[in-house]
Amino acid sequence: MDSTQVVDYSASSDTIITTTSAGLSQQDADLMATMIQAMGAAFIGILIFFIAMMIFMIVCNWIIFEKAGRKGWESIVPYYNIYVLFQFIGRSLWNILWIFLPIVGIIVFLIKMNVSLAKSFGKGTGFALGLIFLSPIFHAILAFDKSIVYVGPNGVPTDQGSGALDSDI
């Protein structure tokens, strides 16, 4: 902290109070420095956790894209990954317009996208709720469970239908 100190010799008491130029006692300044160091350590820990989660989700999405018959690298290209995802879950790109509606639109977008993703891999509404609320866990299940296979866009096998994208918004 600041090395400039002011010593106050108070006539009314026998204690000597050492203060910094900011007006803090030395004890308060030391406490503040300790708290800042602790917050810095906590921030670094949280940052490492979030970086690890990002890497984990990239790996999961890479495997999910490969299970759907796409190339894994397509999952890491911004914007293009959304286009490809919408193709293999059977959603029209018009669905992205939900994002522009504040709060409600984003919620509807996430629900529709995750329900279609779950159906595309032969799973139901319960799994879609897991994808919405416990995303890292259920993306890992989708990616690493060998028994879960890609069925087709929105759960319709590609040999039974045209595989066309839905047109609803």
Image: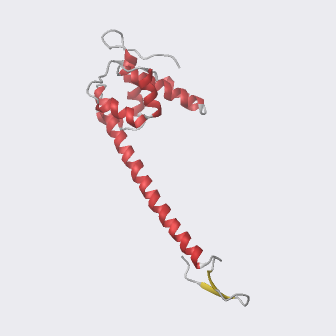
User: Residue 104 vs residue 62: left or right?
Assistant: right
Q: Residue furthest top?
A: 160
The picture quadrant where one finds residue 130 is top left
| Location of the N terminus (image quadrant) | bottom right
Foreground of the two, 9 or 151? 9
User: Residue 164 vs residue 1: left or right?
Assistant: left
Foreground of the two, 165 or 15? 15
**How many numbered circles are shown?**
0
Q: How is colour applied across the structure in the image?
A: secondary structure
- Residue 36: x percent and y percent? 52, 66
- Residue 53: x percent and y percent? 38, 44
The picture quadrant where one finds residue 126 is top left
- Residue 18: x percent and y percent? 61, 83
Residue 124 position (above or below residue 50) = above
Foreground of the two, 155 or 136? 136
Q: Residue at x 34, y 29 (%)?
A: 142
Residue 158 position (above or below residue 127) = above
- Residue 147: x percent and y percent? 27, 24
Q: Residue furthest left?
A: 146
Residue 94 position (above or below residue 74) = above
Q: Residue at x 57, y 32 (%)?
A: 100
Q: Residue at x 47, y 33 (%)?
A: 133
